[in-house]
Image (cartoon, rainbow, N blue to C red):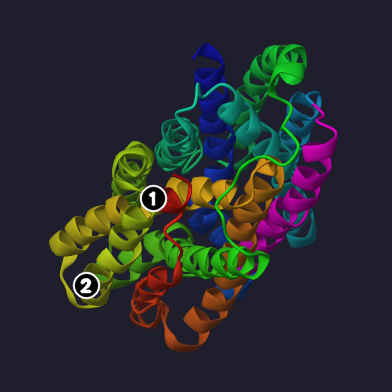
Amino acid sequence: MHILGAVAFVHLLNDLIQALLPSIYPMLKAEFSLSFTQVGLITLTFQCTASLLQPWIGLYTDRRPLPFLLPVGMCFTLAGVLMLSIVSTFPTLLIASGLIGVGSSTFHPEASRVARMASGGRYGFAQSLFQVGGNVGSALGPLLAAAVIVNRGQGNIAWFSLLAVLAIGVLYKVSHWYSGHLASFKPKAGGHGPNLSRNKVMGALGVLALLVFSKYIYMASLSSYYTFYLIDKFHLSIGAAQLYLFLFLAAVAAGTFMGGPIGDRIGRKRVIWISILGAAPFTLLLPYVDLFWTAVLTVIIGFVISSAFSAIVVFAQELVPGKVGMIAGIFFGLMFGVSGIAAAAMGHLADVSGIAYVYKICSYLPLLGILTVLLPHIEQAKK
């Protein structure tokens, strides 16, 4: 359990550092005279480097686990944070963002494997605890950014390098445990998965990918542009807008934690149904309400829609047993890649039509949750 807690804690630190980028977008936009399109390109650069490597790292380490990648990958994050604190041009800002993304791409597949190894068979709970660490970090990021960086200057970003150093130290210890327990957790040949044909498994993975697509494009609209939306529509200060962003991200953390254990009890398909399609009425209302109800609805949306991800990852891992790293890499990578492309597209749309229009368009995405009906009932199939 202490190893599971350790990787969840480092996930907190990793995602807290990642949350710096959207949290300081208003400051960077003013300091570098950026357009919304350029803001979207920062997100695209970070999330593409964070996504493109993940499936390949996961696929390779399923065959040849590399425990040392955990602390080594975090060194890229450390370099990115230090560079972010001193850059003076837009291209170097993109490079710094890309380095932080590389650190994330090496962390997630191996850390997700360690979480499953240390789960004691409670895979949904372990994935939720691992995920909620990241969500808590994402929620804390805007608060710490407001306290340490906003109104104090770009150089203060360097303070967050201390968190990366702490993460490297913890991961060094975790990598030793991981290395010492590899023999006990080697996947057995012909591991038992659901009794489904290859085409049905691939079809189910495709449906899960589309569900992640709908969920994380909508989440990108909030994590990347929510502060701009509040500032534009309700004339809030940057600090006040970040408090509302914290409320949303805290709700995401709570929903993530609840989703895994509930999926262990009632079935992951039911959780996916409720989570994605259940958020649709609230997302459709959001663009038309006042500040109070905007806050209430985003908290509900964050809680409901976030409960799906742990269930989706474990569902996919059960469809393809023995490929924990590859599945984690694909779904974490898909999450980052889709979010990055969507953020860039939404930035351009905001430049052309206004930030409020972005939320009207994105409000329909959770309706794709209806695709859950196409998923097989693998809990029953495995009995």
Q: Is residue 37 above or below residue 8?
A: below
Q: Is residue 309 above or below residue 43?
A: above
Determine if the magenta segment contains residue 18. no
Q: How many marks?
A: 2
Task: Please give left or right for residue 104 compared with residue 144 in the image.
Answer: right
Can residue 200 be seen?
Answer: yes
Q: Amino acid at mark 1?
A: Arg
The residue under the point 73% across, 61% down is 90
Q: Earlier in the sequence, mark 1 or mark 2?
A: 1
x and y, in percent, of residue 358 in the image: 41, 79
x and y, in percent, of residue 185 in the image: 69, 23
Can residue 39 be seen?
Answer: no
Task: Please give left or right for residue 371 compared with residue 314 in the image.
Answer: left
Q: Which residue is mark 1?
A: 268
Q: How far apart in space, not on screen, are marks 1 and 2 (Cα)?
A: 22 Å
The part of the image, by quadrant, that contains residue 40 is bottom right
The residue under the point 65% across, 39% down is 108
Q: Which mark is residue 137?
A: none
Q: Amino acid at mark 2?
A: Pro
Quarter placement of the C terminus: top left
x and y, in percent, of residue 206 in the image: 58, 69
The kind of secondary structure element at disc 1 is: helix
Please state which of residues 53 and 44 is positioned toward the viewer in this rendering: 53
Crowdedness near tag 2: few (<14), some (14–19) or many (≥20) residues, C-alpha within 10 Å: some
Main SS of residues in magenta: helix
Determine if the magenta segment contains residue 46. yes
Crowdedness near tag 1: few (<14), some (14–19) or many (≥20) residues, C-alpha within 10 Å: many
Q: Which mark is residue 281?
A: 2
In the rendered structure, which segment of residues is drawn in magenta?
39-66
Q: Is residue 177 above or below residue 207?
A: above
The kind of secondary structure element at disc 2 is: helix
